[in-house]
Amino acid sequence: MAEVITMPRLSDTMTDGKVAKWHKKVGDAVKEGDILAEIETDKAVQDFESEFNGTLLYIGTEEGGSSPVDSVLAIIGSEGEDISGLKNGGSGADQSDANSKPEASVPEENKTENASTGVETSKPVEKEEGASSAEIPEGVEVITMPRLSDTMTEGKVAKWHKKVGDTVKEGDILAEIETDKAVQDFESEFNGTLLYVGTDEGEGSPVDSVLAIIGPNGTDVSGIVAGGGKTASVPKAASTGETNDAPQTAEESAPKAASASSSERVAISPLAKKMAEDKGINIHELKGSGENGRIVKKDIESFTPSQQAPSAPENKPAAAASPVSAPAPMNFVQGEDSETPNSQVRNIIAKRLSESKFTAPHYYLIVEINMDKAIEARKEINSLPDTKISFNDMVIKATAMALRKHPQVNSSWQADKIVHHGNINVGVAVAIPDGLVVPVLKNADQMNYNQISASVKDMAGRAKSKGLKANEMEGSTFSVSNLGMFGIETFTSIINQPNSAILSVGAIVEKPIVKNGQIVVGNTMKLSLACDHRVVDGATGAQFLQTLRTYLEQPLTLLL
């Protein structure tokens, strides 16, 4: 029976896709795992794999053409099978309009993946300045502003580590790019000389615009720049003698295979990479079944969480940092007003929190927890060798387990539906000098206390040093914010969209309590749950807090 393949939604914001290149044509045999086409989304060009065996009977979108998400992209079935009823009025490959002129596709050699971020970008064939691909000299590489997060539309160059005329090697940090979420190092993938800088330090430019040009020293790139920017004026006589523009040896140019080392690139399809990030799977521990050891979709689907060992890297000690810390104080000058330009992070925080507060109908539930038994349990756990957990770690673990029993709280509102997430990914709010970021613990319900503690310390430390990657701050399904270490007893938070709830954790306070009819000294902690009433009803939120209270007041129940 014929299978209808629809245009996939390859990113959260994708509404239609463009077929950059077909790898199969009508009449070709197709096997599961074969790359059918390269799909250009609003973010990158990605390989699209077949999930079926058969013959390609129909192509709904010609190479260079676009079509909406979920429209018929192709049909695979038995050779000679009648598919007239499946086309839904579409035109096959043999019925395409000869007069239509497809847009220029993105060639394979113009796709690039940044090693430090894992984000695939593409070098535009047609430059906005008017230069065409034919004008790009041999050995010259055009670097575009990468999309380092799902919501990024433009990037700001916080700092250039190279200047025009400098020698650049593969792996060198070119610049620090400030996104809507963090500042990230951006590495070069090429050897050569930095010939052109498209965005000055401190300025921003749209995603996919020309960021820099690298090539052989002295190369004229004015045809690409079209008179704008800064071209290298370093004379060839000043060359240091390094032949960075020399052809690479076979050993240098050979593709790197998947390796257990997190510093090496892994051969993986973009679809498999996105699935791995969503599931919290370390791709460096996977063995690919595709061509030349390439990791494909079925490798992700067959991977079981029991194979994972999420922990802090052994060769890099985790920073001893709290989940939330106070930002650095500003200088105060009596009688003088001062101004601080908003950073990209601060602008996005303002935009997102305003949207959340004004679009999601917030309500709040507050509960007081007796923490006496949790304090005793923590003492016993921390008496074990090489173990030191915090109360925040215990709250995160209990929260993740409570979300298992109340999946409605682990859901998100979309325009015409509610999405119930299959993974429990807990975001932990971390204060940085520019504002607030939320690194995410993927599959937190499957992590033990040591793994949670190590991951939180590692990510919180790297957040303060701007070392977090974009994919470490994406995909949360629930968030936790803790101000207890500052002595704050109770507070409410704004929901971190697209989550439907956020838990606010206060300080543990020693106070008189009533126990077995007697007034005794006890230790209590207040939790506040902010809920989106479109998704989480009052009773559902209350039941979630009841379960969470049980887990914290009776820690042994986490083992049931």
Image (cartoon, helix red, strand yellow):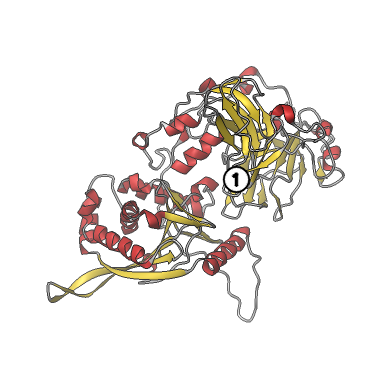
Instruction: Please tell me which residue is depicted at 83% across the width and 44% down the height of the picture.
Output: 129
Q: Is residue 238 above or below residue 23?
A: below
Judge from the rendering whether residue 428 lies leftward or rightward of residue 522; answer left or right: right
Q: Quadrant of residue 251?
A: top right
**Residue 219 shows in the view:** no
Viewer-side residue, 60 vs 551: 60
Tell me the residue at 47%/65% (across/down).
326
Amino acid type of disc 1? Answer: Asp
Q: Quadrant of residue 321?
A: bottom left
Q: At which x and y percent is residue 213?
A: 75, 39
Q: Residues within 10 Å of mark 1 (few under 14, many from 20)?
A: many
Residue pushed farthest top? 250
Residue drawn at 58 percent across, 74 percent down: 332
Rendering coords of residue 47 (x, y %): 60, 32
Of 90 and 194, nearer the camera is: 90
364 with respect to 239 (left or right) = left
Front-most of residues 55 and 142: 55
Which residue is rendered at x = 61% and y = 76% of the image?
333
Rendered view: 388 above or below 297: below
Depth order, front residue of 193/7: 7
Instruction: Judge whether residue 532 can be spotted in this image.
Output: yes
Could you say whether the residue bearing mark 1 is in a helix, strand or loop?
Answer: strand
With respect to residue 367, does 149 lie above or below?
Answer: above
Query: Would you name the residue on which mark 1 appears?
Result: 185
Residue 368 image offset from top left, x and y in percent: 29, 70
- Residue 122: give x, y in percent of width and height: 68, 38
